[in-house]
Amino acid sequence: MVRLKSLSALLGAAATLLLGTAARECYVDEGRGDNGGTHWVSVGNHQQLNRFEGCTTLIGSIDIANTFTGPFSLRGVRNITGTLSAYGAVDEIDLPDLEYIRGVILFERYRVNRLLLPRVKQTKGIFLSQPRGFFFDLSALGTAWVISLDGPWPKVSFPSLENVDFTLSFETQRSWDHTGYRDPAPVHIEFPVLRRVRELRLEGDIKSLSIPNLEEIGEGGLIVKAQQADLPAVDMLSLRTLQTRLSLWGGISRIDLGPLRETNASMYINTIVPVEVHSDLYHAGDISIYGELKTLNLTSLLHADSMTIGTNIRAVECSEHAVWTYRYLHRPREAKFCNKRSLIRAGRNPWPDILKPTPTGFEPSPTPTPTSDFSHTTPTVVPSTSPSPSPHPGVVPRPGLGYAADIVIVTAFGILLLLSIAWYWTNRRRKVDCEEEEGEKEECQRGRGPPPISKAQMEIAREKGEAERLLQGEIEVESEDEGVDAPPPYAKHVRG
């Protein structure tokens, strides 16, 4: 047993040594770096191509010159640190052992019939623009930064692609191409295991689209423009994250956003055929729908920043949440684009009664809990007490001058109350001070007013000719019987 283990270890070490010896790095320009320090070579014939035999890694970029003829084939090369470009017509590019390449660039003006990279797993960028009849094999590609495809091809398939860090785009007919070089050609697009992409842009004669496992669309959003061909469906049955925007145009018959629950993306839909829209969204950004609309099945929608429906759209089968949200955003308007059955199912619109002046205590009659007959998705949120995602319709405006006027009145009353309390305590304090300081009678009298005058004091003052000064409090007169029988006091206005 020990001998077998030792033999296995020895064989493993020998295999590693042989692989290390076989691995060979080659500069494409033999290390000159003439192009500004970068390594680059233009291959114009098979003799130049044969120099790379035995190399496993090519350092630099390769351009296929317009003088090159026949198939371009490199076996044994597993890595190319630069890009591969064609500047001439090439029947076939075949790199059967390649696993990594920085980028592939094929322009439409230089025709290539076949691109075979069956083992490439990772790349920075793939840029392919070729006419009808072009075929490519990137069946092992799992990760890329950018993929840009352009051509009237019958099928686009990336069976192993899972992640695109930036943009994944495909166009069957560029908007600026008016030469008539291409004929419309329906294309089938398949990304069976794609999970994450920053921006997904598909435009042209799209016959079918399959992205069953797509979970995240980043800041670039999703843009699909089905132009000539009718696209049966845009189904994203695994989508959980959508940022920035969702823009769907053309002949699309069904749109399903799957398990997506919340997004701030602006959703724009403009179709030329009646479309069914299905979504379990709770919260949405701006929703704009134009063109032809058959079904608006927003089974769980509680809030949207805005909802705009084209004025020509009528008799749409709407879910209850779609009606409630539209009513709330456009209160007190009714969702007239929905058919009569949908409006009845959603219950009476309470907003006209809520927003008009009503007697205090008015309470709209409760709306029975609606039931949905949609079979596509099951509603996950069913309101039990409120007929809309808005505030309860029983809350009506309070009659009166308004809250602002009430605040002003209460504030004025409070100020008067404080002033009265201050006046009371000031006078009470002055009285107490006068009682404690008996010697300062003159000052206290000024604060308390003149003392009471008896009839006897008035008569004495008249005899002395000082009645006026007595009334003004300038003098005091003592009477002999003041303490015996004091008559009621005289005020300043008492006449003699």
Image: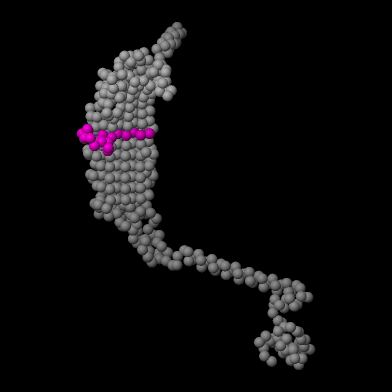
* Left or right for 59, reference 428: left
Horizontal and vertical percent for residue 101?
Answer: 37, 23
Comparing 403 with 83, the one in front is 83
Left or right: 198 in relation to 113? right
The spot of residue 422 in percent (x, y) is: 63, 69
Residue 96 horizontal/vertical position (percent): 31, 19
- Give the extent of the magenta segment: 166-183
State the residue in front, 353 or 245.
Answer: 245
Question: What is the quadrant of the C terminus in the image?
Answer: bottom right
| Vertical placement of residue 318 versus 126, above or below | below
What residue do we see at 29% from left, 45% from top? Answer: 269
Q: Position of residue 336 (x, y in %)?
A: 27, 55
Q: Residue at x 35, y 47 (%)?
A: 286
Quarter holding the N terminus is: top left
* Relative to 450, residue 389 above or below: above
Q: Quadrant of residue 452?
A: bottom right
Choose between 93 and 436: the one closer to the eye: 93
Magenta stretch: includes residue 170: yes
Please name the predominant secondary structure of the magenta segment in the image.
loop
Whether residue 104 appears in this view of the structure is: yes
Q: Up-down: is 52 above or below 385?
A: above
Q: Is residue 132 magenta?
A: no
